[in-house]
Amino acid sequence: MPDIDLKITHCDAYLHVEVRGMGTYENAEYMWQSVVNACEQYQCYKVLGEQYLFDSVSTLEAFDHPALFKKVGITQKHRFAWVDKNPRTRETTQFVRDVLASRSIGYGRLFTDTESAKTWLLSKN
C-alpha cells in the first residue's frame, strides 16, 4: 500500500492533484495511475499538480518514468502543470521532466508556484 497522501479534485476545466509523502517509484506509479483513472472518469485531461515529497526517486527510477507513463496510460492528450513545493526535491523532479521530454513524452511543465502553473495550464487548448 502506498505511503502517500493523494487528493484528486475535479474543478471546472482541470483536475487538481495534491500529493504529499515519500518519493518512491511505487508511490509514483500509484499516483500516476490514480491521475489517469480520474482523467478517464471525468473526461478531463488537464492536470494541475502540487507535490510536497520528503524524498525523491533515485536517478535510476527517474529514467524509468517513460515506461511508467506508458504503463499507466499517459498519452499526448494529457497536459500537466506541476508544482514541486519542496526546494530539496525540485531538482530531481526537473530531471524526471527532462527525461520524459527527451523521450518525446513532454506533456507538461514544472513550476515553482501554483498560480503560474494554473495560468499556463488553462491557456493551453
Image (cartoon, grey):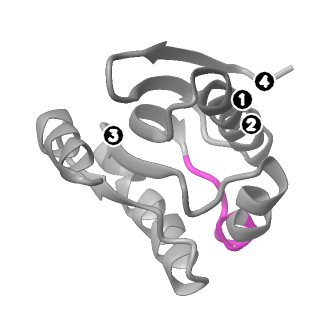
Q: Position of residue 108 (x, y in %)?
A: 40, 59
> Mark 1 = which residue?
37
**Location of residue 5 by image quarter:** top right
Alpha-carbon span between mark 3 and mark 1: 26 Å
Q: Is residue 37 above or below residue 113?
A: above
Q: Is residue 41 magenta?
A: no
Alpha-carbon span between mark 2 and mark 1: 6 Å
Disc 2 marks a residue whose amino acid type is Gln
Q: Circles 3 and 4: CB distance less than 8 Å?
A: no
Q: Is residue 62 magenta?
A: yes
- In primary-sequence order, the first of circles 2 and 3 is 2
Label 3 Cα neighbours within 10 Å, binned few <14 / some 14-19 / many ≥20: some
Foreground label between 2 and 1: 1
Disc 1 marks a residue whose amino acid type is Asn
Alpha-carbon span between mark 1 and mark 4: 16 Å
Nearest the viewer among 97 and 107 is: 107
Q: Is residue 2 above or below residue 90?
A: above
Disc 3 marks a residue whose amino acid type is Asn
Point 38% across, 63% down: residue: 91
> Mark 3 = which residue?
86
- In primary-sequence order, the first of circles 3 and 4 is 4
Foreground label between 2 and 3: 2
Alpha-carbon span between mark 2 and mark 3: 23 Å
Query: Which circle marks residue 88 in the picture?
Result: none
Q: Quadrant of the N terminus?
A: top right
Q: Circles 2 and 1: CB distance less than 8 Å?
A: yes
Disc 4 marks a residue whose amino acid type is Pro
> Mark 4 = which residue?
2
Magenta stretch? 56-64
